[in-house]
């Protein structure tokens, strides 16, 4: 079984449909025409003609009779269909205009490429905001015990940096750097800043003598970095900024 010390250090377009099979085949043909790249206006006009003729033949003939009447009814219904289609395009243009990046005074055209770039950037921004909300925030220091040490590391969010300060009160450098922990926790709220006495964690006498004070960084339950005996690097009583710079340079703290 691994000891506590081992663990610490490393372990598209819409078409109308009919109930008759023949009309369904007509609609499929119309879709194919659009997909094959025919002129859009021509396709819309053709579709409107078919809808108008069908509507006239299936619906009531209230006003006009004869060939001229039939044609007039068809033309009137065709105009109605085209007007409705144009209204749809106008609404889409208005909605798209809200996202145009170009200055309206400089260009009256809707730039689809720039709109796609804008929407992609907008989605990325929203994803970042959602991740920010989902990421735990702390802002305080947490005292660990031998019993909850491993559970705290293993149960932390996968995106959370867990930083553990290992110390002993009789070591002057440990006392000095312990005072900086609350400030570190406030300035790095996404990090879980913890501390534990080496003796309480059942660390060996050799480690207490040679390894303290010590910072261990974890992420996803694994050791990310161990900065052992920081006195060899920054001394016994370095300023706060020196300690933070050292923690970042040694990958114990992330860069903000």
Image (cartoon, rainbow, N blue to C red):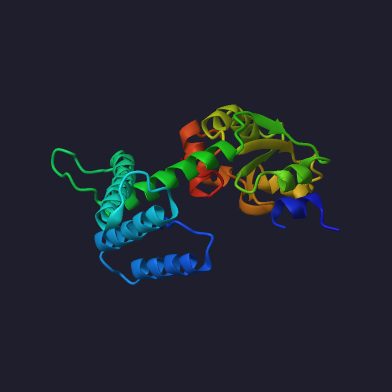
The quarter holding residue 199 reads top right
Q: Report if residue 239 is visible in the image.
A: no
Q: Residue at x 63, y 31 (%)?
A: 178
Q: Which x, y percent locates residue 142?
A: 69, 32
Give the mark count: 0
Q: Report if residue 144 is visible in the image.
A: yes
Q: Which x, y percent locates residue 180?
A: 57, 29
The quarter holding residue 63 reads top left
The furthest residue to the front = 66
Query: Is residue 114 shown left or right of residue 55?
Result: left
Q: 156 or 141: nearer the eye?
A: 156
Q: Residue at x 61, y 37 (%)?
A: 136
Q: Residue at x 78, y 44 (%)?
A: 151
The N terminus is located in which quarter?
bottom right
Q: Which x, y percent locates residue 59?
A: 43, 50
Q: 159 or 38: nearer the eye?
A: 38
29 is higher (above) or lower (below) than 13: below
The furthest residue to the left = 106
């Amino acid at each position: 079984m691994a000891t506590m010390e081992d663990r610490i250090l490393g372990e598209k377009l819409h078409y109308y449909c009919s109930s008759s099979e023949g009309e369904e085949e007509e609609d499929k043909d119309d879709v194919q025409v659009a997909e094959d790249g025919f002129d859009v206006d021509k396709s819309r006009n053709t579709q409107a003609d078919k809808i108008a003729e069908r509507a006239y033949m299936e619906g009531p003939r209230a006003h006009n009779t004869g060939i001229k009447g039939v044609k007039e009814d068809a033309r009137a219904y065709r105009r109605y269909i085209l007007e409705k289609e144009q209204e749809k395009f106008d609404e889409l243009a208005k909605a798209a205009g809200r996202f145009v990046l170009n200055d309206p005074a400089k260009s009256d055209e809707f730039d689809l490429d720039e709109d796609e770039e804008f929407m992609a950037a907008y989605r990325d921004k929203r994803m970042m905001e959602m991740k920010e909300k989902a990421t735990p925030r702390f802002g305080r220091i947490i005292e660990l015990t031998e019993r909850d040490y491993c559970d705290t590391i293993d149960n932390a969010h996968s995106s959370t940096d867990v930083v553990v300060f290992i110390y002993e009160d009789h070591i002057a450098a440990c006392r000095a750097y312990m005072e900086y922990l609350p400030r570190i926790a406030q300035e790095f709220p996404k990090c879980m800043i913890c501390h534990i006495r080496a003796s309480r964690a059942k660390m060996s006498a050799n480690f207490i003598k040679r390894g303290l004070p010590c910072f261990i960084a974890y992420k996803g339950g694994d050791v990310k970095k161990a900065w052992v005996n920081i006195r060899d690097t920054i001394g016994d009583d370095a300023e706060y900024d020196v300690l933070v710079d050292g923690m970042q340079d040694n990958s114990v703290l992330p860069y903000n």
